[in-house]
């Protein structure tokens, strides 16, 4: 009888403890997928769709700024190289692409700004090489920029630039142009 009483008391104690733990605040088991209660996202720090989109947009903006700044360095080098080597061909087009990239960046079209800036850099590389210089390794596309590069877009981007924006290469090479943001 004594053993039976102890067994009954232990069983009662275990069952009341489990009910008490589950009923206590924060003691409930976590819900599975698809069973979200109101407020669950805030309490458990689950990112909402809008926050995820904001993060992607911020990352795209930062990448665009990074790419435009790096292209500005290459453009300045191409301009100096063309002045020394007297081979200007394509500089007006490259400058127009970088200017268009700056405009698009300022209007919030970051992906397009990246495309135009990478095209400007590609044209600047040609200018440097046409003047018998080598493109410095640190100016080549890195992994961060490679994600956005699409070689097939070059002709399309060239066609999108308005003809009146392109001046003569000889005239543009002499101008002090702000390529950076």
Image (cartoon, helix red, strand yellow):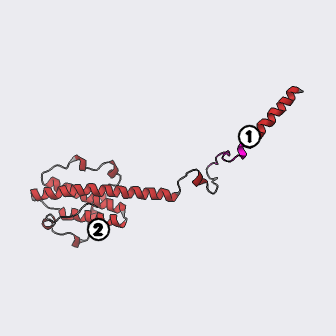
Which percent across, then down, holds residue 47?
52, 54
User: Residue 92: horizontal and vertical position, in percent?
Assistant: 19, 65
Image location (x, y in percent) of residue 57: 42, 59
Q: Dot 2, how many residues are within 10 Å of its Cα: few (below 14), some (14-19), or many (20+)?
A: few
Which residue matches tag 2?
Answer: 160
Quadrant where the C terminus lies?
bottom left
Residue 40 marker: none
> What residue range appears in magenta?
17-32
Instruction: Name the residue: 19% across, 50% down.
Output: 135
Spatial CA span between label 2 and label 1: 70 Å
Which residue appears at 61% of the width and 56% of the height?
Answer: 39
Q: Residue 23 lies in magenta, yes or no?
A: yes
Q: Which mark is residue 18?
A: 1
- In this view, the residue farthest toward the right is 1
Q: Would you say residue 151 is visible in this rendering?
A: no
Q: Quadrant of residue 90?
A: bottom left
- Pointer 2 and pointer 1: residues touching (CB < 8 Å)? no
Is residue 27 placed above or below 107 in the rendered structure? above
Q: Earlier in the sequence, mark 2 or mark 1?
A: 1
- The percent coordinates of residue 168 (x first, y second) are 15, 68
């Amino acid at each position: 009888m004594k053993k039976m009483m102890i067994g009954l008391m232990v069983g009662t104690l275990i069952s009341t403890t489990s009910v008490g733990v589950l009923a206590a605040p924060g003691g409930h088991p976590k819900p599975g997928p698809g069973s979200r209660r109101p407020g669950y996202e805030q309490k458990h720090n689950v990112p909402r769709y809008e926050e995820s989109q904001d993060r992607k947009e911020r990352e795209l903006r930062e990448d665009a700024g990074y790419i435009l700044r790096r292209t500005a360095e290459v453009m300045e080098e191409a301009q100096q190289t063309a002045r020394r080597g007297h081979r200007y061909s394509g500089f007006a087009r490259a400058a127009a692409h970088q200017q268009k990239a700056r405009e698009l960046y300022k209007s919030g079209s970051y992906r397009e700004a990246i495309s135009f800036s990478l095209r400007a850099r590609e044209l600047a590389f040609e200018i440097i090489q046409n003047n018998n210089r080598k493109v410095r390794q640190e100016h080549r596309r890195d992994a961060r920029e490679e994600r956005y590069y699409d070689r097939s877009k070059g002709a399309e981007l060239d066609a999108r630039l308005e003809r009146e924006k392109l001046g003569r290469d000889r005239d543009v090479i002499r101008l002090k142009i702000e390529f950076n943001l």
